Image (tube, helix red, strand yellow):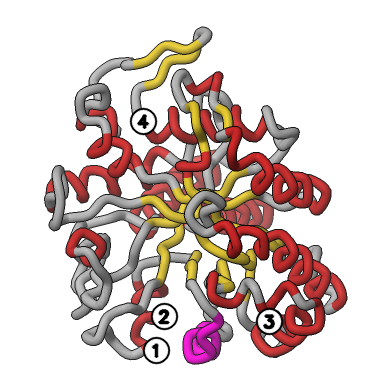
Amino acid sequence: MAAVMLLLGFIAANFGITGAQVGVCCGLLGNNLPPISEVVALYKSNNIKRMRMYDANHAVLNALKGSNIELILGVPNSELQRLTDASSAASWVQSNVVPFWPSVRIRYIAVGNEVSPIHQASLAQSLRPALVNVFNAVRSAGLNEQIKVSTAIDTTLIGKSYPPSEGAFRDDVRWFVDPIIGHLVWAKTPILANIYTYFSYVGNPGDISLPYALFTSPSISVWDKGRGYQNLFDAMLDALYSSLEGAWGGDLDVVVSESGWPSAGGTGATLDNARTYYTNLIKHVKGGTPKRPNKPIETYLFALFNENQKSPELEKNFGVFYPNKQPKYNLNFGVQRNWDLLAEHNSTTLSISSDM
């Protein structure tokens, strides 16, 4: 019986890990959103075990204390230039990380989000120094084994993405991306990437079908060196893997720090399409891609709420919950699935016990 109980404990613990694979980004650009304490309660009641936030909002950090929710803590782009100074980076970590660890389970610090070396050249020059300084400050605090320091890129840095095996970063961004990749490889830290099949689809509807973007294609749409692609998400992620390989970063893991589909405000932006995308994405990332099969993909849905202070209109409609905390879609973040599996194992275990 002791062995049976140990087995059940092991199963339950591992189900918790499985359920935590998908997180949700927490943007707060709305004037009709619930209090922070209710936001954290919403995560807990829906078994959402991971959160991404975009700045060091102390109200959110205090509400997360003891919640066991793992966090991507953001450093806004507006802070990057200041953090090129090492003492400022140390102060940032001492103010926004050290007082909250370990009661807040900070998993990553994202230094900057989608910094463009093409449209934001001066800002891009600040990113790597800020990244390194925050890393050094975290290491000085003795937390570098617990908290990984990275940055979130977008897929527009990839100049060639088809076929996925020939993915490569644009030549005119290599001065920016290569040193960042080099640091992350040295630090053994995943790179964060925002991957949106929606924008690829609306930008090229002649070549990309809606089912391919929504994970509903009935058959393989693309063959590439013996690998079959039935959805655009896999193709985009594998193109990123190939791009990293071409920049000496082939060993890096990728965390999908944003992915979502709007429910209104643009071409193909409907409730049904968004529901289909989010539902299928949650299921799909528990596996892997053709290039890296059977490797779960840590992924964060964008976003928790519709945010009415964003623009254009499309950007207001990525929420998986309405501001009144009602779910926009019936998404399964792991609660029922885990309990069903546990019940199945309970039944099997009881049968074994009865035979003893």
| Quarter of the figure with residue 328 | bottom left
Query: Along the line of sight, which residue is nearer the eye, 343 or 330?
Result: 330
Boundaries of the magenta span: 56-64
Task: For mark 1, give the secondary structure.
Answer: helix
Query: Along the line of sight, which residue is nearer the eye, 178 or 334?
Result: 178
Q: Amino acid at mark 1?
A: Ser
Give the distance between the C-alpha atoms of the residues marked 3 and 2, in whole angstroms: 18 Å
Residue 151 pos. (x, y %): 61, 58
Q: Which residue is mark 2?
A: 40
Q: Amino acid at mark 4?
A: Leu
- For marks 4 and 1, the one nearer the N-term is 1
Q: Are marks 4 and 3 in contact (CB under 8 Å)?
A: no
Which label sits in the foreground, 4 or 1? 4
Q: Is residue 34 visible?
A: yes
In which quadrant will I find the N terminus? Answer: bottom right
- For marks 3 and 1, the one nearer the N-term is 1
